[in-house]
Image: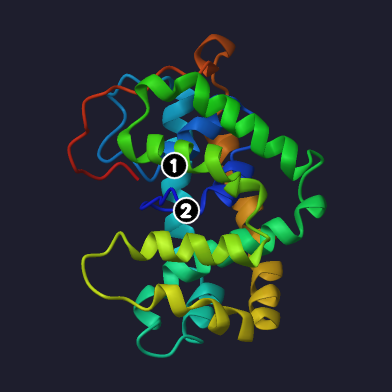
Amino acid sequence: MITYLSNMNHLAHLLLAGDDQALQLGAMLGDHVRGDVSASGFTAAVRCGIRLHRKIDIWTDHNPLISSARALFPVPYRRYAGILLDVYFDHLLSRQWAAHSALSLAAFNSRTLAMLKQHQASLPSGLLQFYRFAKATNVLARYGETAMLQQVFVGISQRFRHVNPLPSALPLLQQHDVRLQQTFAQFWPHLQQTSQHWLAEQMPISAADRHAAPPPRSPMKPGSDR
C-alpha cells in the first residue's frame, strides 16, 4: 500500500482556485513551498495560487465557526482538530460535489492528475509523493468514501514521530456529522466569496504569464509571504 505522509486537504483548495491551471498548481504547492515566493521562479499566476492557499488557511484558522467546531473534539483529538476538520470538509465537499462544480468529480480528478503529470519532473518531493498516491488511489475522486477517509487519516498519522489518535478519529467525526455539515454549509459560501474577492484584487495576470512554470528544485528558505 502506498502511504502519503503530507497534507491531504487539496480538494477545497483546488476548487477555490477556479479553472486556471496555474492557480490550481499554486494551490497545490501551497503546502509544500515555504518562504517568500515573490522572487521565485514561479509565474505570477502560480505565485498567486500559493498565496491564495496561504490566505485560505489563515481565514479558516481565524473563523469563529471553525473555532466552535474545534471545540467538539475532546482530548486527545483537540490537538489535531485542524487536521481533522480540513480532511473532513474535503469529505463533505466530495459528498456534495454536484452542488459546487459543473465538472464531475471523476473528470476533476483526471484533470488534476494530468496537470501534476505535466509538471512531475520538477514538483517538490512532498507534492510528488501526493501525485503518486493520488495516481494510485484516485483519492481526489474518493474522499466521499469512508474507507478512503480512514486511509487518509492513517497516512497523515504516520507523519508524526509520536503516537497520535488520528487513526481512531473517524467515528468521532461521524458522530458529529450533522453539526459539521451545518458548519460547512455556513462556512463554505463565505470562503468562496472571500477567495473570489481576493483573487479579483490580484488580477489581471497577463495570458502569457498564466502558463504554469515548473517549480524550482531548490527548497525555499522559511519566511513569511502571506
Residue 20 image point, x, y percent = 62, 27
Question: Vertical placement of 101 versus 57: above or below?
Answer: above
Residue 19, can we see it?
no
Residue at the image point whose x is 51% and y is 28% from the top: 116
Say whether residue 126 is visible. Answer: yes
Residue 176: percent from the left, percent from the top?
Answer: 62, 84
Q: Residue most toward the front?
A: 1
Q: Secondary structure at mark 1?
A: helix
- What amino acid type is highlighted by mark number 2? Met
Q: Position of residue 82 (x, y in %)?
A: 43, 69
Judge by depth and name the residue closer to the eye, 60 or 114. Answer: 114
Tell me how far mark 1 sits from mark 2, CA to CA: 8 Å
* Image quadrant where residue 112 sits: top right
Under circle 2, the secondary element is: loop
Counting from the top left corner in percent of width and height, residue 178 is at 70, 81
Residue lying at 21% horizontally and 26% vertically, measured from the top left = 218
Q: Is residue 195 above or below residue 189?
A: above
* Circle 1: residue type: Phe
User: On the rendered image, what quadrant is the C terminus found in?
Assistant: top left
Check the image and name the residue furthest to the left.
221
| Residue pictured at 60% horizontal, 58% vertical | 90
Give the numbered dot on residue 130: 1
Q: Are marks 1 and 2 in contact (CB under 8 Å)?
A: yes
Task: Decide if residue 104 is on the left or right side of residue 127.
Answer: right
Residue tagged by mark 2? 8
